[in-house]
Image (cartoon, rainbow, N blue to C red):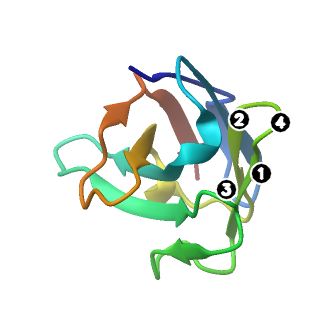
């Protein structure tokens, strides 16, 4: 089992920044690719960004490319999401997730952290 706990959400004005953190415990963190997803009210959960186990590869949704940056610190068992130039449409609950090697689906999910961007 892998336990994931997100933090860093909050209320910010449009154009502002937030940094989300996701702390992992339970298994060897570096064995898992990590991703961030989000779900806005009344909408389906959507992919935001992913990072490989080593941190050498990243993949961003077009909607956040150039504004969000994912990183990870395997020594601290933590993945980060730096969000800049936030827009009201970024308002959502943000979830981090872990994916085992060779899997196509994410195995473990955090509880989520609310991000609200006011206009």
Q: Which of marks 3 and 1 is in front?
A: 1
Mark pair 2, 1: CA separation: 19 Å
Numbered disc 3: secondary structure? loop
Decide: marks 2, 3 in contact (CB < 8 A)? Answer: no
Decide: marks 3, 1 in contact (CB < 8 A)? Answer: no
x 61%, y 36%: residue: 29
Which of the two discs, 1 and 4, labels the residue nearer the N terminus?
1
Q: Which of marks 2 and 4 is in front?
A: 4
> Which residue does the numbered mark 4 point to in the structure image?
75
> Which residue does the numbered mark 1 point to in the structure image?
17
Q: Nearer the viewer, mark 3 or mark 4?
A: 4
81 over 21 or under it: above or below: below
> Which residue does the numbered mark 3 point to in the structure image?
14
Decide: marks 2, 1 in contact (CB < 8 A)? Answer: no
**Horizontal placement of 14 versus 73: left or right?**
left
Which of the two discs, 3 and 4, labels the residue nearer the N terminus?
3
The image position of residue 82, as x and y in percent, is 74, 53
Q: Residues within 10 Å of mark 2 (few under 14, many from 20)?
A: many
x 53%, y 17%: residue: 26
Kindly identify which numbered label has been placed on residue 47: none
Mark pair 1, 4: CA separation: 25 Å
Mark pair 2, 3: CA separation: 26 Å
Kindly identify which numbered label has been placed on residue 78: 2
Q: Residues within 10 Å of mark 4 (few under 14, many from 20)?
A: few
Q: Residues within 10 Å of mark 3 (few under 14, many from 20)?
A: some
Which of the two discs, 2 and 3, labels the residue nearer the N terminus?
3
25 over 92 or under it: above or below: above
Q: Which of marks 1 and 4 is in front?
A: 4
The image position of residue 42, as x and y in percent, is 16, 44
x 18%, y 51%: residue: 44
């Amino acid at each position: 089992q892998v336990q994931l706990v997100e933090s860093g959400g909050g209320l910010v004005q449009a154009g502002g920044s937030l940094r989300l953190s996701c702390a992992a415990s339970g298994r060897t963190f570096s064995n898992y690719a990590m991703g961030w997803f989000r779900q806005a009210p009344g909408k389906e959960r959507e992919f935001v960004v992913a990072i490989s186990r080593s941190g050498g590869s990243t993949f961003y949704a077009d909607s956040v490319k150039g504004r969000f940056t994912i990183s990870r610190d395997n020594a601290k068992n933590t993945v980060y999401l730096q969000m800049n130039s936030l827009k009201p449409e970024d308002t959502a609950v943000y979830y981090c997730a872990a994916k085992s090697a060779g899997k196509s689906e994410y195995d473990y999910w955090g509880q989520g952290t609310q991000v609200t961007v006011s206009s």
